[in-house]
């Protein structure tokens, strides 16, 4: 099907984009990579009055360093993320998860920011952002900026802390150096499919001891979830298959996954435990 | 209506389009480039794959207005006159198709894959064409076709380097 008619704006700066959003009427949609929005508009599940296309806002694109952080522009495409040298050095968990998103053609258009704002529980990047304690830099009308932590950004199914008229500008994540091991473990059944469950793990080792652990779960509830019990069990533990297996057994604690055609809730909880064990085992270098 | 200027398969066009027009519909209905087909309504099948500024995209999931100022290559623009592109030739010789509906997209995805990775493993080929569905072949001969094309393109590449070397 073809989308319903809309007015189209193509700003080239963040300020112009915010003005176009403010001037766009009641129902304005921001178009990033379009890889979720255009399908939804084609099915007429969305029929915005105005579409503000931010693909030419070049200041939103690219990855830079800022002290101990990586700053990823909202319009950096999945393809750009995978091929970026700074991401390769300090953001391997993001790269691993992004490689599992969709297929090469979708990754040429789809963006880091779009995937986070879309906030699909089965999307692969929200759990990574949560595990990394990402900070979301948001611009509002008049150009005012605010920063929202990942724990507050993901509010519900397809819902974030972004208010009407606001634009996600960039996302800050801590650099993970060579003392960190990472793994994104995704379970799905067919090519280019979304996660049934996935686990993002980052583990810092000093010798044989785990000193920090960050575990994010994909599709185990209406938002991404931190597996805090697993993290607590891992920190201070000696790295061994037994400790990792025992810690991973707590991965489903406090989760309320949905049941659908792909999996029942109890099966998802089983997957969370198995995938957490695999992800942490790999991240810890076992 | 919005005016767009695009180059498609080497020719320049200036056209008025509605913002909601999908790139694939512009290509097929306004330019008559019916080699690019539509196989689904969900951005899954990849039958509509073209190159936008040298990168594979699903042309049903890009607006025509977004191609303004860009270069588009469709399946109709990859052959060199009557000489098939090595990937087209390999699909023909390896029987990489049955009904042929997925073929334009498969070939465009494969050309993009080989540009980024001239010597892909079988696994890398399957991942590279992950966004393209084929209902007929079971993919086996498609993978063989991409392998053949990779071999021919890299030996052709090596040959032209040798030729240049000999001339220098
Ligand atoms: C076939 C297919 C398979 C896929 N498989 C996966 C998968 O396995 N895993 C996965 O994670 N994703 C998958 N995706 C989704 C893909 O990751 C999309 O790129 C992503 O969900 C949306 O990003 P986008 O840039 O295309 O955003 P768009 O579609 O342009 O926008 C999505 C939403 O976010 C809003 N938005 C976007 N950017 C901003 C911004 N900067 N500020 C404010 N609002 C904004 C838009 O208004 C819209 O509501 C798949 C998509 C397709 C078509
Ligand atoms: S027509 Fe199926 S992906 Fe474009
Ligand atoms: S040959 Fe028929 S769909 Fe691929």
Image: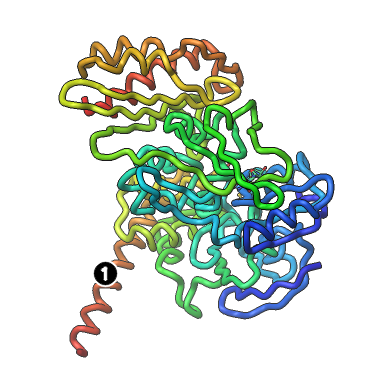
The colour style of the image is rainbow
Q: Is residue A185 visible?
A: yes
Q: In x, y percent, where is residue B154? A: 29, 67
Q: What's the residue at 16%, 22% (across, down)? A: A208
Quarter of the render that holds ligand 1: top right
Mark count:
1
Are there few (<14), some (14-19), or many (20+) residues within 10 Å of tag 1?
few
Q: If the image is split into quadrants, where does the C terminus of chain A sit?
A: top left
Q: Nearer the viewer, residue A1 or A274?
A: A274
In the displayed image of the protein, which residue is found farthest to the bottom? B167
Q: Is residue A194 visible?
A: no
Q: Is residue A116 above or below residue B46?
A: above
Q: Nearer the viewer, residue A18 or B57?
A: A18
Horizontal relation, residue B12 to residue A180: left or right: right
Horizontal relation, residue B31 to residue A286: left or right: right
Horizontal relation, residue A102 to residue A54: left or right: left
Q: Which of the chains bears the disc numbered 1?
A: B
Q: Secondary structure at mark 1?
A: helix
Q: What's the residue at 31%, 66% (across, down)? A: B152
Q: Is residue A52 above or below residue A155?
A: below
Q: Which residue in the structure is indicated by mark 1?
A: B155
Q: In x, y percent, where is residue B74? A: 57, 67
Q: Quadrant of residue B68?
A: bottom right
Q: Nearer the viewer, residue A237 or A186?
A: A237
Q: In x, y percent, where is residue B164? A: 24, 84
Q: In x, y percent, where is residue B102? A: 56, 53
Q: Nearer the viewer, residue A165 or A3?
A: A165
């Amino acid at each position: 099907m073809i989308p319903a008619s809309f007015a189209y704006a193509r700003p080239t700066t963040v300020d112009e984009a915010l003005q176009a959003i403010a001037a766009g009427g009641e129902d304005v949609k921001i178009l990033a990579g379009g890889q979720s929005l255009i399908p939804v508009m084609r099915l007429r599940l969305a029929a915005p009055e105005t579409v503000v296309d931010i693909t030419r806002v070049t200041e939103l694109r690219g990855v830079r360093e800022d002290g101990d952080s990586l700053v990823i522009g909202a319009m950096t495409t999945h393809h750009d993320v995978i091929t970026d040298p700074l991401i390769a050095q300090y953001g391997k968990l993001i790269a691993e998860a992004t490689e599992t998103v969709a297929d090469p053609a979708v990754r040429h258009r789809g963006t880091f920011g779009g995937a986070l704002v879309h906030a699909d529980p089965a999307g692969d990047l929200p759990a990574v952002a949560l595990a990394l304690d990402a900070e979301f830099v948001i611009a509002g009308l008049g150009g005012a900026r605010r920063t929202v932590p990942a724990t507050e950004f993901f509010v519900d199914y397809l819902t974030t802390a972004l208010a009407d008229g606001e634009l996600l500008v960039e996302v800050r994540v801590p650099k993970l150096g060579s003392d960190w091991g990472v793994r994104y473990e995704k379970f799905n059944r067919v090519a280019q499919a979304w996660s049934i469950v996935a686990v993002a793990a980052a583990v810092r080792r000093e010798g044989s001891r785990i000193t920090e652990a960050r575990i994010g779960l994909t599709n185990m509830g209406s938002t991404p979830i931190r597996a805090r019990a697993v993290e607590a069990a891992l920190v201070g533990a000696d790295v061994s298959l037994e400790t990792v297996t025992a810690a991973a057994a707590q991965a489903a604690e406090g989760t309320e996954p949905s049941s659908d055609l792909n999996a029942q809730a109890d099966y998802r909880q089983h997957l969370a435990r198995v995938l957490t064990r695999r992800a942490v085992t790999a991240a810890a270098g076992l | 209506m919005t005016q767009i200027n695009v180059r498609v398969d080497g020719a320049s066009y200036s056209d008025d389009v509605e913002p909601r027009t999908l790139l694939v519909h512009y290509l097929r209905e306004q330019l008559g480039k019916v080699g690019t087909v539509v196989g689904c309504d969900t951005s899954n099948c990849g039958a509509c794959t073209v190159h936008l500024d040298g990168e594979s995209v699903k042309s049903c999931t890009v607006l025509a207005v977004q191609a303004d100022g860009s270069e588009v290559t469709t399946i109709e623009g990859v052959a060199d006159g009557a000489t098939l592109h090595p990937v087209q030739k390999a699909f023909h010789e390896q029987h990489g198709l049955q009904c042929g509906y997925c073929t334009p997209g498969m070939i465009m995805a494969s050309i993009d894959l080989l540009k980024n990775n001239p010597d892909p493993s079988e696994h890398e080929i399957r991942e590279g064409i992950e966004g393209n569905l084929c209902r007929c072949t079971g993919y086996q001969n498609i993978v063989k076709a991409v392998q053949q094309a990779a071999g021919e393109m890299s030996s052709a590449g090596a040959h032209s380097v040798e030729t240049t070397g000999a001339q220098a």
